[in-house]
Amino acid sequence: MRDTDLLQIALGLSEPWFVEKTEFDAELRRFDIFLDFRKGSMFACPECGKSGKVHDSVKKTWKHLNFFQHETYLHARIPRMRCDEHGVKLVDVLWARKQSGFTLLFEALVMAMMRMMPVNAVARQLGVTDKRLWRILEHYVGKDLAEQDLSSLEKVGIDETSTKKGHNYVSLFVDMEKSKVVFVAEGKDTATVERFTQHITEHGGDPKAITEASIDMSPAFITGVEKHLPEASITFDKFHVIKLLNKAVDDIRKEERRTEPLLKSTRYLWLKNPCNLSNGQATALASLSKLKLKTARAYRMRLVFQEAFTLSRQFALTALKKWYGWAIRSRLEPIIEFAKMLKRHWEGIVRWFTSGLTNAVLEGLNSLVQAAKARARGYRTVKNFMIMIYLVAGKLGLLST
């Protein structure tokens, strides 16, 4: 079997295409494969599919997967066929998409590598500029999003993440049942929710079909959901609520530490759950708890509050109401402020006992985003960052043309 025949099989070429010749340069570490089509061949119009004769041809080159350590390129003259209905059209080829200087197999490799590596690292390994790789990624993400079907979307989670430390934010909208990002919007205000509803409508969904929304207590998100997702019941993530209570406990510890030296370097004793303490930490906490400390009292209140979330809805509501009364009379200002917040957001907090939604899914996806951001050490544009979020957290099928 000739080398050209072997390459023709390996490349998956079929009539009228064939491998005309190859050129190998060991010094330049380069392998060039030249393709051509049979004389007199007919080609399908890319618009209507009707066959027509070749009008002329255009020479093109595509970067292909390396042949061992040698850069490999495909070269071919691509026919322009004459269609009676659409005029002269450049035909489609099986090994590459239009307006791309890469073969489909090369782009598949790029997409697989960019899921795991920074784009600039992939660019260095493959010997192309990162701008060209971003264009590949933008194409496949854009195509997949254009075909997105949101007709079954009913439960959403909303979270924000910074594009760079201390800089602009983007908002992530997550399908809570499929655990994937379905929309990313620049900013973290009410308008992002409105843009999300437009995205839903454009992709076969209905904003009124959204019955549950898991969010933090951002006023912008609360207003956005109430205004633009009118049928959605809001659930405030219980872990976010407990985090706020932990902050209240820590604020009390900080204030009391000024007069109680024993509280120095004890922060994590009060913030950890008892089951997560080491033996030494548990002994130290037990000793401190015997003292008449405001911090110890706040800590016990925190444990009682958490315990309510292990009960059934009926008993939990009773327990939380009693806890509110205890907290509001506690004379511990941070705890009192937390209790007032609990009352203001009561419906959203106790909704958890019905919806069961938490931000665990959002935190998991956000961790993927943060890991990708750390690997890349920032992105040149917010647009690139949003594209990367879809890549790592959108569960997109990105390898179709």
Image (cartoon, rainbow, N blue to C red):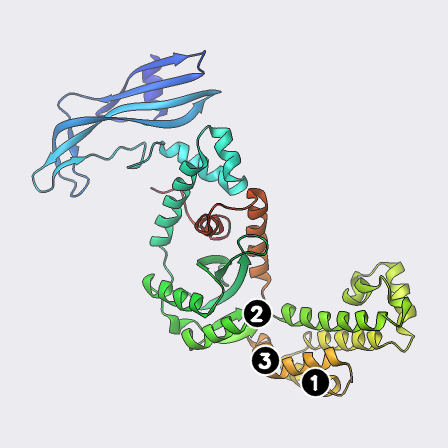
Residue 295 showing in the rendered view:
yes
Residue 389, position in %: x, y?
49, 51
Residue 91 located left or right of residue 33: left
The residue carrying mark 2 is 216
Under mark 3, the amino acid is His
Query: On the image, numbered disc 3 is attached to which residue?
Result: 345
Of the pair 138 and 357, the residue shown nearer to us: 138
Q: Name the residue rendered at 54%, 41% in the picture.
A: 116
Mark found first going from the N terminus, 3 or 1: 1
The crowd level at tag 2 (other Cα within 10 Å; few <14, some 14-19, many 20+) is: many
* x and y, in percent, of residue 251 in the image: 76, 71
In which quadrant of the rendered image does the N terminus lie? top left
Which mark, by number, is residue 324?
1
Q: Residue at x 50, y 72 (%)?
A: 220
Question: In this picture, is 323 found above or below 71?
Answer: below
- Kindly identify which numbered label has been placed on residue 241: none
Q: What secondary structure is marked by label 2?
A: loop
| Residue 49, quarter of the rendered image | top left
* Residue appearing at x 54%, y 69% in the figure: 215
Looking at the image, do the residues carrying marks 3 and 1 touch, with CB atoms under 8 Å apart? no
Image height check: is 240 above or below 104?
below
Query: What is the CA distance from the residue labelled 2 to the residue labelled 1?
Result: 20 Å
